[in-house]
Image: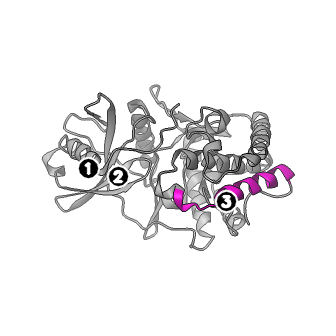
Amino acid sequence: MSAKQYDTLDNITLIRLAQEALAGYPAALQGELRLLCRSENATFLLVANGKRYALRLHRSDYHQKADIESELLWLAALRDTGIQVPEALLNRAGEAVQTLRLADGTERYAVLFHWIEGEMPTTDVDPRAFQQLGQITAGLHQHSRHWQRPEQFQRIIWDHQTMLGPNSHWGNWRDAPHLRRDDWAVIEQTIEQVGRELDGYGKASDRYGLIHADLRLTNLLIHGDETRVIDFDDCGLGWYLHDLAAAISFVEHHPRAVEWVDNWIEGYERVAHINEADRAVLPALLIQRRIQLLAWAGSHQATEMAQSLGERWADHSVRLCRRYLEGRALPIGA
């Protein structure tokens, strides 16, 4: 799979594509578009007839149309159970996923969502906020374990090879900025040991299934007493407890990371049980995610997020690998 992970189109081209997508919707949805952010995809705010909507313009080389349609199927099933997640609107052709064709013959996909109100928490919040994150994640996992996926359902696969292998979804970890070649051996040894642990852990249906895969605080919105979950773009088939590793993405080395993990587990246990085998594999999943993020940083070097990680982020990653290999503590924290 290509490691081309961020959109290289200029803002003018993206806005033109967004306007083209908007033209496919009914008159009541015609309004003013504004580019909100460029991360994995481009997200636009639409204001039409006094209401707000979010238009997501997908990057190329990541999802097929059927993948995005499957994401929307899961969102619809989650809403049926009362979980607050995004809801897509249909265009005039009755499609939730609209196809846009560029002059060079390539295709892009666009989805228009109802706007979800709420405030996004940050790592500055009380560590107990991770209890709520863990509880919500457990609810998603319980739904995944019992939901009968439609026959045409297809989503990205998150396993050891697709995360850390030579053709991983997010690129090659060796390309991470500021990573010294002298440290490659430590990471390679870590990857081999993680692979052995996960082979032993296996992919039984109570351990491996449909997950959000990026359920961090930045993908929660707090509105009154309700917590809404957003950004299912990376959802796919993976180990359930990968969602715990994803919860502390990029900040695994933070001094409070152990508190965050403890609180996440406490919240999760209110809904679903984490057994001894699950707990035993947590170090492997935590360090696997961190190395996966090294690959992400390498394939996203031109992005603001990757540049904000700083020069020591790779060094911290190697330090956490060594901690994992020592086996005395979770590979997180200062």
Q: CA distance from mark 3 to mark 1?
A: 36 Å
Q: Residue at 38% across / 32% down in the picture? A: 65
Q: Residue at 80% across / 41% down in the picture? A: 189
Quarter assignment of residue 75: top left
Residue 319 lies left or right of residue 311; in this view the side is right
Q: Residue at 39% across / 51% down in the picture? A: 86
Decide whether residue 131 is among the magenta residues: no
User: 325 or 279: which is nearer to us?
Assistant: 325
Q: Reading the chain from its start, which is encountered first: label 3 or label 1?
A: 1
Amino acid type, residue under disc 2 in the picture: Thr
Q: Reading the chain from its start, which is encountered first: label 1 or label 2?
A: 1
User: 200 or 144: which is nearer to us?
Assistant: 200
Contact between labelled residues 2 and 1, with CB atoms less than 8 Å apart: no
Amino acid type, residue under disc 1 in the picture: Ile
Mark 1 = which residue?
12
Residue 252, numbered circle: 3
Residue 214 lies left or right of residue 30; in this view the side is right
Picture coordinates of residue 138, whole percent (x, y)? 60, 52
Mark 2 = which residue?
43
Magenta residues, start to end: 307-327
